[in-house]
Image (spheres, rainbow, N blue to C red):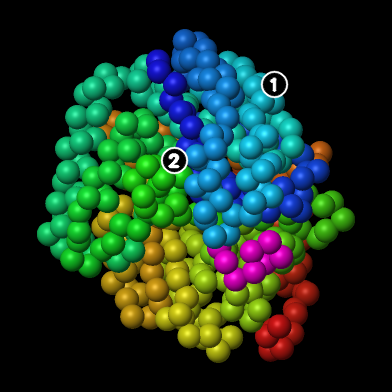
């Protein structure tokens, strides 16, 4: 195969958001990342594994060009010191280990500094996806079905059948291929819609190429590693540590907070007046979206913040029908936006892969996510998950902060 990842910009925008804050505040942190295929009926052949390894070697040969660094430097929240670091940065193939063990026939782990390993997640997942679909199926046939479905989607937006307001493409990690994602971004950016606006993509390489906005702020790894990486901290306060470090880095810029790293209810304990004012909005990634949105609107009202001034960003397993329903429900009550992934980048006649690569350790100790949906977390140590849940439950049940102070 040709190289799948052709530029170090070919990653999600939040990797640069988090990467800059990691560089300035947590450059000594070390993490372990673990790949998992959640599809029970998927098997990676030895030939696929060898091609995946070859593609990751090719990725590790890439370096940032001056043109790419100049592009990053023009983003208002990116600092020159971070661009200078990226000028020297290179992926390390030695950070990866591979095996054919496990139920899917593919095991990948990456260990090293958080600065390095954070950057590996998205390219690795994109490589695994494309290798699998090119080698397991008739790729040309899949692309034909992808094009037909994309054309149908665009027609429904143009006709006004779906009116979803602001939306962006979030599908890099689970795309059918680089070709498919680029076609989706190019096609969506070429049209105008009655009550929908394509505002950008998470893929920084494509955002640069098509002169659209790179979209993305923070991921679960930020809250997990900042909140749980310092072993002296009570992990039930992960959100406070993570939000505090983010504001230290960005102030009022680049502010969409992710709510469900250790449950949204626990997040709201720390998302009081200061942070709720500084952050421009919040992102939903698990649990019932309507219930979550109502909870966030009520929380803003409790803090005497007008919800209409804040953005509710939905990004959990969306398609246009779901987005249209959510938009109608919250229309006029808050700003609503959508990050739509697999539905735009890998919608074909065959099911998409449900693959992830998650942080499983930070500074030599387990980390975990306790989201609003059971089963979305990934931790190797059940005892640590039990410990984290007990910390959260203690805080929620017994350590009742005086929220009426609104500080």
Relative to 191, 251 lies left or right: right
Q: Is residue 37 visible?
A: yes
Residue 118 at x, y = what percent?
63, 40
- Residue 51 at what x, y percent from top left? 48, 15
Residue at screen point 22% across, 43% down = 150
Q: Residues within 10 Å of mark 2 (few under 14, many from 20)?
A: many
Q: Which residue is mark 1?
A: 94
**Callout 2: helix, strand or loop?**
helix
Question: Tags 2 and 1 in contact by the CB under 8 Å rule?
Answer: no
Q: In the rendered image, is residue 376 in sight?
A: no
| Nearer mark to the viewer, of 2 and 1 | 2
Instruction: Give the position of the C terminus as an image quadrant.
Output: bottom right
Using residue 390 as the reference point, say whether residue 281 is left or right of it: left
Q: Is 181 on the left-hand or right-hand side of 390?
A: left
- Say left or right for 343 vs 33: left
> Is residue 252 inside the magenta stretch?
yes
Q: Which residues are magenta?
A: 247-254
């Amino acid at each position: 195969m040709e190289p799948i990842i052709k530029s170090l910009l070919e990653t999600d925008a939040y990797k640069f958001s988090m990467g800059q804050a990691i560089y300035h505040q947590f450059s000594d942190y070390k993490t372990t990342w673990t790949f998992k295929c959640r599809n029970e009926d998927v098997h990676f052949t030895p030939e696929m594994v060898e091609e995946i390894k070859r593609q990751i070697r090719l990725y590790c040969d890439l370096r940032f060009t001056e043109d790419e660094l100049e592009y990053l430097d023009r983003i208002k929240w990116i600092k020159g010191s971070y661009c200078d670091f990226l000028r020297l940065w290179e992926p390390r193939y030695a950070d990866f280990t591979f095996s054919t063990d496990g139920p899917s026939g593919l095991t990948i782990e990456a260990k090293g500094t958080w600065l390095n390993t954070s950057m590996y997640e998205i390219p690795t997942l994109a490589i695994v996806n494309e290798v699998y679909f090119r080698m397991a199926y008739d790729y040309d046939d899949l692309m034909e079905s992808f094009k037909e479905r994309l054309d149908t989607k665009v027609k429904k937006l143009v006709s006004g059948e779906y009116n979803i307001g602001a939306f962006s493409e979030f599908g890099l990690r689970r795309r059918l291929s680089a070709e498919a994602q680029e076609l989706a971004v190019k096609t969506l950016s070429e049209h105008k819609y009655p009550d929908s606006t394509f505002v950008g993509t998470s893929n920084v390489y494509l955002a640069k190429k098509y002169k659209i906005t790179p979209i993305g702020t923070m991921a679960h790894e930020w809250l997990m590693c900042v909140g749980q990486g310092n072993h002296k901290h009570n992990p039930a306060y992960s959100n406070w540590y993570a939000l505090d470090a983010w504001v230290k880095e960005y102030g009022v810029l680049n502010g969409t907070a992710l709510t469900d790293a250790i449950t949204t209810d626990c997040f709201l304990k720390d998302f009081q007046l200061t942070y709720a004012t500084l952050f421009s909005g919040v992102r939903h990634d698990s649990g019932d979206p309507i219930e979550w949105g109502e909870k966030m609107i009520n929380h803003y009202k409790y803090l005497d913040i007008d919800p209409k001034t804040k953005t509710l960003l939905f990004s959990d397993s969306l398609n246009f029908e779901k987005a249209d329903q959510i938009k109608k429900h919250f229309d006029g009550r808050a700003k609503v936006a959508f990050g739509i992934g697999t539905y735009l980048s890998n919608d074909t006649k065959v099911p998409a892969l449900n693959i992830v690569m998650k942080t499983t350790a930070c500074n030599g100790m387990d980390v975990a996510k306790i989201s609003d949906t059971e089963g979305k977390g990934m931790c190797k140590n059940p005892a640590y998950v039990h410990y984290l849940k007990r910390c959260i439950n203690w805080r929620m049940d017994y350590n009742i902060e005086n929220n009426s102070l609104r500080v």
